[in-house]
Image (tube, grey):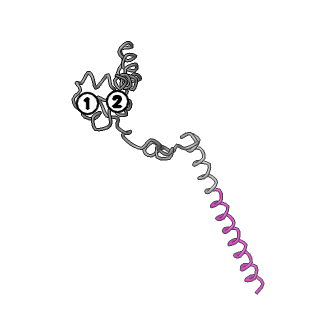
Amino acid sequence: MDNCKQNDIDFLPYINRRQDLLENYEVPLQSEMASQLGEPLANVVNSTMTDVGKILMGTFDNLKGPPRDLWISPSDHLIGKVRLTSPYSDKLLKALTHQTIIELGMETEEKIKNEMEATIEKVKAETSNFEKY
């Protein structure tokens, strides 16, 4: 008789947990079931459960990892999205281009003028030398 009472006392926590689950309309966690029944028996119970039971148990869809890396570097986020834009507007670029063309033209004009003056001075010098003789 004592042996029977001892077995009842050993199962008392499990019976109390089952009673709590029934009163609260809950099901045990998958990990709790695996630890109480053992992994092989828990797998058998899971495989024979109905879809509703699997949903309540939280085992209907096995958890899958993320579809891709959890962390993506910020530079990888920008690939395909980077669009460099000019800090200047189109009107400003046209004005700057026009101004640069004018400056280049003025420099060229100055060089040509200096060359012409140098040529004129050279011709004057040759003419004055020719007149001396």
Residue 1 falls in image quadrant:
top left
> Mark 2: few, some, or many residues within 10 Å (few <14, many ≥20)?
some
Query: 110 or 98: nearer the eye?
Result: 98
Mark 1, secondary structure of its residue: helix
51 relative position to 6: left or right: left
Left or right: 12 as drawn, with respect to 84? left
View extreme (bottom): residue: 133
Identify the residue position indicated by label 1 in the image.
45
Seen at 65% across and 59% down, the residue is: 107
Q: Is residue 13 above or below residue 31?
A: above
> Residue 133, how many percent across, how many down?
76, 87
Amino acid identity at mark 1: Val
| Residue that numbered label 2 is attached to | 33
Q: What amino acid type should be assigned to the residue bearing mark 2?
A: Met
Dot 2 or dot 1, earlier in sequence: 2
Determine if the magenta segment contains residue 63.
Answer: no
Give the side of residue 34 with respect to residue 108, left or right: left
In the depicted structure, whether residue 128 falls above or below residue 39: below
Q: Nearer the viewer, residue 83 or 71?
A: 71
Range shown magenta: 106-133
The percent coordinates of residue 84 (x first, y second) are 51, 45
User: Where's residue 117, x and y in %?
Assistant: 70, 68
Place residue 20 in its image quadrant: top left
Can you tell which quarter of the image residue 2 is in?
top left
Q: Does the magenta stretch mainly form a helix, a strand or a loop?
A: helix
